[in-house]
Amino acid sequence: MKKILLKCTILIVVLCSCQSRQQVTAPISTIDSTLQTNVTAILESKLSEINAQSGQVIVMEVQSGQIKALVGLTRKDSTNYQSCENFSVWQSTGLMHPISLLVALETGKVKLSDKVDTGNGIYQVQGRELKDHNWHRGGYGELTVQEGLAVSSNIAIYKTMEKAFGNNPQSYFNLLANMSYGKPDSITGIANLKPAHFVTPKDNNWTKTAFVWSSIGYNQHVSPIQILTFYNAIANNGKMIQPQLYKDSVVVINPQIASRASIDSLKKALVFNITDGLGQHAKSDKVVVAGMQGTSSLSTNEDSTKDMYAVEFCGYSPTDNPKYSIIVSINKAGLPASGGLMAGSVFRQIVDIMNERQ
């Protein structure tokens, strides 16, 4: 009888110790449930207002990579939206301008104060036209590189790429790879995330005009969370951190994506974009923010009202000691399509409610 009692006692102790170990190792979500609810309401309101197809918002802690809000919504019917797991969506991006500029700054051949002539808003490249969004109003003429970024000038960015890389576009892609652009390849808790894909001079489908479109966000497939990871590294003075949905130790993807001088220059330009550029709709009265807006065409139809666009904004705050980075990515059919006006205003509202809670 004593032996039976002893065996039962040992079994209970073993079971209890196993259960306690399971409780300790159970994954703990990084999501802030209150913030998740607030962000969902803000995004849904904007999607409804602009009659968008879908959208997502991701809020991440700069230094830890912990995701505090992960909201995806898609159209349910003519008036309502429903939650969806659209975080692995793979498409071109309108947020490439600052990334390309950082690559160019790293060559030492360009600086923010350099002058660039965008002409009448139409630039001929190998028989194809590269246009700025205001080409029908006569273009921006001569700008500094910093001003070109702030008005989202495709021509200013590409001419800066020409100056930095000349006839060697492969060196651009080599630097991008060194910066870990397009990482991470996977994130625990986000299904079907794929490594970012780019067309490079090494590929068979590379053309003479491919570098133009690559430098402004086309000829590639990338997910918003991969773009956010890069912008978060800018906010983090160059240290790229693995995003995480479950609390764990910090994982560093790249300890320094670019020189501190180049990072500091780009951070200055991202603040200028908010104060003096097309990013003004993201400007908060409560805290100083930095970031970039973008709009990219996802498809072209004979009926232009059915063209699909991605309107996006990515940034961080506060600028002096960044705590959070945020990306807003919305897909909608037809014009108007403005990353600054549509996604930037969502960014501002989220920054404001987060600031109120502190």
Image (cartoon, rainbow, N blue to C red):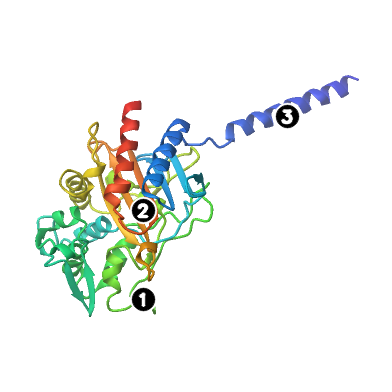
Real-space Cα distance between discs 2 and 1? 23 Å
Instruction: Please report the residue visible at 58 percent of the width from the left and 31 percent of the height from the top.
Output: 24
Real-space Cα distance between discs 2 and 3? 47 Å
In the rendered image, residue 214, in percent from the top left (x then y), is placed at 31, 67
**Residues at badges 2 and 1 in contact (C-beta under 8 Å)?**
no
Q: Amino acid at mark 1?
A: Lys
Residue annotated with mark 3 = 14
Reading the chain from its start, which is encountered first: label 3 or label 1?
Answer: 3
State the SS at label 1. loop
- Residue 147 falls in which quadrant of the image? bottom left
Residue 220 visible to an observer of this rendering: yes
Residue 314 visible to an observer of this rendering: no
Q: Amino acid at mark 3?
A: Val
Number of the label disc, if any, that sits on residue 202? 1
Real-space Cα distance between discs 3 and 1? 59 Å
In the rendered image, residue 259, in percent from the top left (x then y), is placed at 23, 52
Residue annotated with mark 2 = 227
State the SS at label 2. helix
The local crowd at label 1, few if under 14, some if 14 to 19, many if 20 or more residues have their Cα within 10 Å, is few
Instruction: Please report the residue visible at 45 percent of the width from the left and 30 percent of the height from the top.
Output: 34
Q: Nearer the viewer, mark 2 or mark 1?
A: 2
Residue 159 against residue 77 in the figure, above or below = below
- Residue 289 falls in which quadrant of the image? top left
Q: Nearer the viewer, residue 299 or 153?
A: 299
Number of the label disc, if any, that sits on residue 292? none
Q: Amino acid at mark 2?
A: Ile
